[in-house]
Image (cartoon, rainbow, N blue to C red):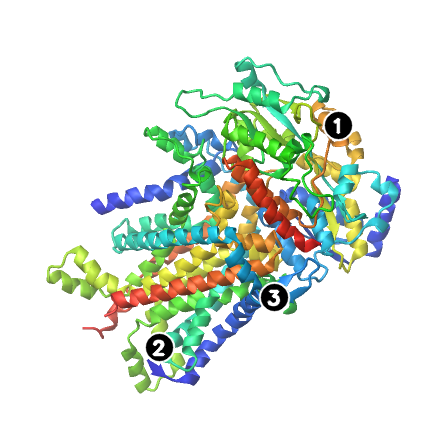
Amino acid sequence: MILFAVLGIISLFFLIPLIWVVASALRPASPLYEYANPLTWKSFVPTKPTLENFVHIFVNLNFGRALMNSLFVSVSTILLTVIVASMAGFALAKFEFRGKAALFTIVLITFMVPFESIVIPLYILIKQLRIDNTYWALILPGVANGLAIFLFRQFFSEVPSEIMEAARIDGASWFRIYWRIVLPLSVPAIVTVIVMVFMFQWNSLFWPLVATHSSRFEVVQVAIAAHRSTENTSWANLFSSAIAGSLPPVILFLFLQKYFVRGISGTGLKG
Amino acid sequence: MFRNNKVAWLFVLPALTFLLVFKIWPIGVSVIESLTMTSFTGTKSFVGFENYEYLFKHDPVFWRSFSVTLFYSIIVNPLIVLTSLLMALLLNSSHFFTKFFRTVFFLPAAISFAVVSVIWMIVLDPYNGLANSFLTMFGFKPQPFFASPDQALWGLILLNVWRSSGYWMMYFLAGLQNIPETLYEAAEIDGASTLRKTFKITLPLLTRTISFVLVANTAFNFLSFAPVYIITKGGPMGSTNLLMYESYKSAFVNLDMGRASAITTILLGIILVFSFFELRFTRARFEY
Amino acid sequence: MRKLLLVMVLLLGVMLSATTIEVLWMGWPQDQVMQLVNAFKEETGIDVDIQLVPFGQLFQTIEVRLAAGDGTPDVYIVDGPNTASYAARGYLLPLDEHFSDEEMSAWFDASIEEGSYHGSFYSVPYGTSSAGIFYNKAIFEEYGVPFLPETIEERLTWEEVAEIAKKLTKDTNGDGLTDIWGLVIEQIDRPYLIFPMVQSLGAKVLSDDGLESQGYITSDEFVEGTTFYWKLFNEWKVSPQGLSDSAISREYFGTGRAAMMLGNEWNLRRMLQYPDLAYGLSPFPYFEGGVAVTPTGSWHVGINSKTKKLEEALAFTKFITGKEAVITWHKLNGIAPARSDVYEALPEVFDNPMWQLFVKEMETTAVPRPRTPGYSQYELMLREAFNSIHYGADPRSTLEEVAARIDRELRKYR
């Protein structure tokens, strides 16, 4: 079908550089441009595929530890953020209250300021709170996520208020309404926030370097970035760790695909 | 809308606490910082708007950076939103290949911006990169890409679109799930074409998602600078010197936190203005 | 002497075995650094919590950590020229009283100079560097150009190098694009490699007090040297523009896409990645009628001025910059040690004529980068200027403009 063809062409754009990187990671360490110029089929299919680059980073460079750390931090942040942000998003979407406009502005501002401008005061703060060099230092600041709140607000505002009114008449508490009605109807939003928060934590590089310094906290992006320096860049290690480090977000996305289901259509209220 | 101060604030309190402690407080410190100048021995003195004044009146590098950043934003923001929306619309189906393509489009987003920058630095290498190898294979002239002041910014735009489209596509896919199938069925009975369905049903009902993606994407693009840091370092000739990179240099190289914070405060203002108009625009156009 | 040091370190270790110090280090291959750290832990019993920061984030991370002002990290890696900046801001502990004259004599003079500021010694030399012209023998043979001289007495002039580069810039397949470049500069726009060019003509790159660039980077000699640099890319076109990463430059040379490379001593190790490459090393060129100048300087080690664990921090610093550790580190990593006794201890490595050449340069022609508390901003702005110049901007006007901006930054250090 035409759709398939169009999608196929678009995906070439995304895939070509990636396939080249994967092929390079599966080759024994070789000069960078050997397979870029000139371009042949060998550029994309390694003639002597080997897993040695991957083995090296896991066995000798403790890449597994970095993956575990990032996974732990990401999952912890997700658990906290989904609860906290969805509650706030619910209030912003469905309630009128004093100070609402100010609050909404605050929520927006928090993601319009770059991390670099707050890193020093934030670092001094976590030192004062005595959570520096702990997992808390990596997790807690990540829960302060205005974008997640904004997203929930957008999605919740589409949940029909009639359902909530009906439940109120039946005597349900607001928390029950939030927990039992609104959240289940917003599975796509929750899934999206899960991916959003996961990737935010997964991709952070600078903050983990500042907030923690013991090597037992090393996160995945630090492990990847370590392979580049002026004096010595290891392309093989860089490519293999980049690929290995990109798999968890992809697996997560793949796994969560099935939750992109029509959420509200079955409520029987419309039409 | 329900009126209830107490309940609303209870729901908001946990998030607000986190935001105040870990975001608003440091942001406040940073804004105050923009009103000070620090001597190299560490003594801070309050100088009011002097940092801003210098930027606006005596700093041609700032103005050049400002215009580069504006140009970049005006192109890259709509471009990314459009491509990700288009991709989501194309994949808003349940063919056997849908899941596969969704994942493929998402793949670049799974890689951090820093690594993506390194990859594109290699792909767009002027003499030996993949891109030029392809071009010459088909008989085109090789291009300088990041080595040319006219092309470098477009290289950044390309890199950004490559990496971000799949990511924002995910948000649109989520938003599309909320549109009841029944509406499409009814329209089909009336004989509506795909295009008509898209414009009359899909887009209007996607308004909130569109505004979300617009605002979030705008903020992201004003604030990120990894490709500049890794590949172009603001060059050639300042053609990719984004404001955020200027701020970063001020903070960590020039050790001039005052100027750095002044620039990011200005950026915050710009983003708020853009967001205001974006929210306005989407509400007026699509809500019914 | 060595035995005495060992005993001292052991005694200290016994006394302090329960303490942990925090060290911030560059993210060199983990397995290499940890070898040294573990050796220290075993020898002294002092625990080391070492953080390996990737190079791209190193300086920012140091700045943020030091900004908290609580004495951590206890020991941190210092890029030689940044010593002045950290020292001026009170981030480094003065070390004069902790190092005996005998200990100080181990290091090269240029290194000690780089680690000092306003007469005090602040950062301990760890590595140093030198540079020269690496050339691809196969390419020279193919085009019938005689090999470059490899002894310090027969140093080439830049004019001669330019001529050779012109002869070896080739379009091998007739498609109008250069396939072999005459000369590639490893770090294409870094002042590190360009300073010696202008200094060869007699230019000074900064005022003696380190606070003024106007009149120095705008002097005729500086402009003249920079114009030669400009011509490499824009007039003779023997050098490719836009190589944004030193690894890419090395790639060009290693894979035969460049006949010559102006590069650092670490290439003696890096070029091992290209087993098919047959190369030679020629001394860093100078200008006809000018002086021979080579670049130098590299990593140092500093102690936090507010450290609460001075004894342990000193023990670690002395260990890691001591002869044994530096020997191990060179074997693992290949960079030039800053202490002369290491060269004597590894004849199998350093009796090689290429290393001999570098050592001679370090002893006779090396000029360290200028010392100024504003080094990082001075270097970055100058680098941006060189970057614009290599893309074609006019040298004189670009340098004039950047001098004004640099001096505005440096003014705050008066």
- Decide: is C209 above or below C394: below
Comparing C206 with A186, the one in front is C206
Amino acid type, label 2: Lys
Instruction: Please report the residue visible at 55 percent of the width from the left and 54 percent of the height from the top.
Output: B248
Q: Residue B203: image x %, image y %? A: 25, 61
Residue located beneath label 1 in the image: C360
Q: How far from the left and from the top, in percent, is residue B162?
A: 38, 47
Q: Amino acid at mark 3?
A: Val
The nearer-to-camera label among 2 and 1 is: 1
Q: Does mark 1 fall on the same chain as mark 3?
A: no
Discs 3, 1 touching: Cβ within 8 Å = no
Placement of B95 over or under A259, stated as above or below: above
The crowding category of the residue bearing disc 2, from other C-alpha atoms within 10 Å (few below 14, some 14 to 19, many at least 20), is many
Res. A94 mark: 2
Instruction: Give the image quarter of residue C282.
Output: top right
Say what amino acid the circle numbered 1 marks: Lys
Q: Nearer the viewer, residue C142 or C405?
A: C405
